[in-house]
Image (cartoon, helix red, strand yellow):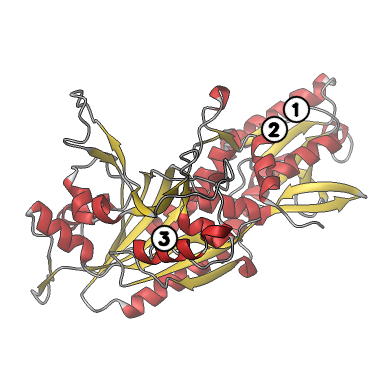
Amino acid sequence: MSEVKLEDIVSLCKRRGFIYQGSEIYGGMAGMYDYGPLGVELLNNLKRAWWKEHVYDRDDFYGLDSAIFKEPKVWDASGHTSGFADPLAECKKCNTRIRVDKELENIGVRADEKMSEQQLQKLFDENRDKLKCPKCGAKDFGPVRMFNLLVKTNMGDFSGDIEAAPVYLPGEACQGIYLNFKNVVDTTPAKIPFGIAQIGKAFRNEISPRNFIFRTREMEQADTQYFVPPHQNKERYEKIKQDRLDWYAKMGIRQENLRLKQHENLVFYAADAWDIEYNYPSLGFDELEGVHDRTDYDLTQHSKFSGTDLSYTDPTSGEKYIPWILETSVGMGRMFLAFISDAYTEDEIGGEKRVVLKLPKHLAPVKVSVSPLLKNKPELVEKAREVYTMLKKEFGTVMWDDNGNIGKRYRRQDEIGTPYCVVIDFETLEGDTKGTVTVRDRDTTEQKRVKITELISRLSGEFALSQD
């Protein structure tokens, strides 16, 4: 079996309606993607699984959905207006901008966007003869400079001077959690230690979005912020790292494709930072999720800039303090790419090549497909419609499929990850097998006769096992 490449995943996503290029009919926009009918189902299933893990299955977590637009001072307090930047250099011939750290990595020079501008300039100068513009091929670049990633908007100000009072789209989704820390404490039974979970949008002025949905200008982040007493972070931090790594394995990601990696250069808010990395096709190991020890930076900064006391008073001891924060943050696009890449399998059935998405059954975008064996036999179609309607009421994402012969239908459903294909044939209507259907398993290709009256309970049991 050949090695899976990123282009295989991109092709499947477009061909089967998982992901489309944003604004494609106008030529497309770099770093923008739309999730199609199958993609949005898989994405929503991942969100539900993540939310269940952090909110429904926990007694010490609370959910939140904060507004995208925020008072601009939020981004001054967080450090984003001054320290949220990527290093770039501009080609003097055609004005194309390059990500300095990534171009250095491409030629085998170790670099990191968290290095100082001076450190990156030194590395860049030492390797100028090996670097060329990806557009025109010239080797004539300007100096390295830090490019702020916050996206500005006029937010209803039509004076024409956006720089006078800029409003920003969120560079990260988590700030809404810090802004609402006091609200959650005041309106819920929350007592430290406790966490807040949120799935929200973030936007970044990426210099060079690339590698499909791995690096985009618009993203959705699933974040947790766990609030602990000062200096009581170490043990909980280690547990959170391991819990998050274990969750991916529990959800079906192969262990050999996961690893933890500590940051050598820390961002401005972190005392410690680790990445859960996934071995992406064609990219190798790269960040899937970040786990950060943010100490008391965020609540201290927002207390200072807002004038609101965000300290916490322990209801038992009366001790008052600014909580420390342990964060997990994952881009849903990167999570999507990891799960669909890990599930992508090429094998052979009867000497014929097969592409199959071996997604965990409860994550599959389509749970069941229903087919009449022959679409020109009204009695089969009528019965198949009855079964289809019954299953759709129970499972929601059920697909009607009567296009092509049964073998082609199976291959099509395999390719989109449908766990079970239900076929209504003549044995369903007559003889000793009357009232039964053929149920075909995606992974094993085994086919079994199942009574229609037992179909929902049998399938529900399989999806429950997958989720557990």
Q: Give the label, 3 or 2, closer to the camera.
A: 3
Residue 437 visible within the image: no
The crowding category of the residue bearing disc 1, from other C-alpha atoms within 10 Å (few below 14, some 14 to 19, many at least 20), is: some
| Distance between the alpha carbons at the discs numbered 3 and 1 | 60 Å
Q: Secondary structure at mark 1?
A: helix
The residue wearing badge 3 is 113
Image location (x, y in percent) of residue 110:
51, 68
Horizontal side, residue 184 vs residue 435: left or right? left
User: What residue is at 39 percent from the left and 70 percent from the top?
Assistant: 265
User: What residue is at 69 percent from the left and 33 percent from the top?
Assistant: 387
Kind of residue sitting beneath label 3? Glu
| Distance between the alpha carbons at the discs numbered 3 and 2 | 55 Å
> Are the residues tagged 3 and 1 within 8 Å (C-beta)?
no
Seen from the viewer's position, the closer of residues 131 and 466 is 131
Kind of residue sitting beneath label 2? Val
Residue 162 visible within the image: yes
Image location (x, y in percent) of residue 204:
38, 45
Image location (x, y in percent) of residue 163:
21, 36
The residue wearing badge 1 is 383
Q: Secondary structure at mark 3?
A: loop
| Distance between the alpha carbons at the discs numbered 1 and 2 | 6 Å
The residue wearing badge 2 is 387
On the image, which quarter does residue 377 sit in? top right
Seen from the viewer's position, the closer of residues 329 and 212 is 212
Sequence-first disc among 3 and 1: 3
Seen from the viewer's position, the closer of residues 150 and 112 is 112
Q: Quadrant of the C terminus?
A: bottom right
Kind of residue sitting beneath label 1? Lys
> Are the residues tagged 1 and 2 within 8 Å (C-beta)?
yes
The crowding category of the residue bearing disc 2, from other C-alpha atoms within 10 Å (few below 14, some 14 to 19, many at least 20), is: many
